[in-house]
Amino acid sequence: MITDSLNDIEGVYSREAELFTAYLVSSPLNEREKKLYNKAMIHFDLKLSNFEKELLKKMMKSNINMATVDAGLAILKPSSLVRRKLFTMLAILEASPNYTSHFFSKEYSWSYYFKLLYVGVRAVCRTIAGVFIVKKIERKCI
């Protein structure tokens, strides 16, 4: 019975790890990093509030939701346990030899500045939308 419960929890954490990895590095997750995330989450045993559970549920729907809610949380609640989960996955990926290439700088042409401008504008828009989404979920959970 306890083993089944632990398997269910690890399944949830595995799904989180896969979605966080897709969001952070746009790559599939390797088994090693998935196990590290599971161990970290079991060790930390984060007790999410109803509000944080709703945020996480919203984030798990798509990468766009993940980015938008993350941007809103960065402004409104940067110490959120949801962001702690996300940053735990980020730390695992950064420290993993399987994902190092995603974190090294590369050489870019001058046209890359147009992409930077686009990404910057998109980030501002996501942050504004994220603030509204986080506030809406917060009101719903009060």
Image (spheres, helix red, strand yellow):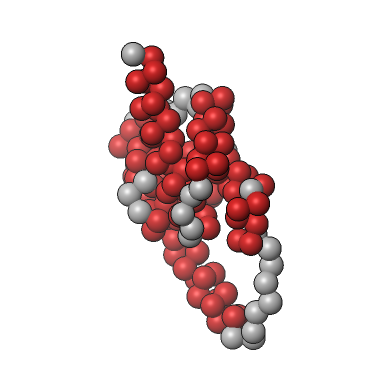
Residue that appears at 44% across and 35% down = 13
Q: Quadrant of the N terminus?
A: top left
Q: Position of residue 57 (x, y in %)?
A: 35, 41
Residue 12 or residue 65, whichever sits in front? 12
Residue 97 or residue 105, whichever sits in front? 97
Can you name the residue that lies furthest to the top here?
A: 1
Vertical placement of residue 84 versus 99, above or below: above
Can you name the residue that lies furthest to the bottom here?
A: 110
Residue 76 or residue 111, whichever sits in front? 111
Residue that appears at 50% across and 33% down = 38
Q: Position of residue 133 (x, y in %)?
A: 37, 49
Q: Position of residue 63 (x, y in %)?
A: 40, 56
Q: How many marks?
A: 0
Vertical placement of residue 90 versus 27, above or below: above
The answer to whether residue 47 shows anywhere in this view is: yes
Can you name the residue that lies furthest to the front here?
A: 31
Residue that appears at 33% across and 49% down = 61
Lateral position of residue 60 relative to residue 118, left or right: left
Q: Quadrant of the C terminus?
A: top left
Vertical placement of residue 57 versus 71, above or below: above
Quadrant position of residue 12: top left
Lateral position of residue 38 relative to residue 8, left or right: right
Q: Position of residue 100 (x, y in %)?
A: 65, 57
Residue that appears at 50% across and 75% down = 118
The answer to whether residue 83 shows anywhere in this view is: no
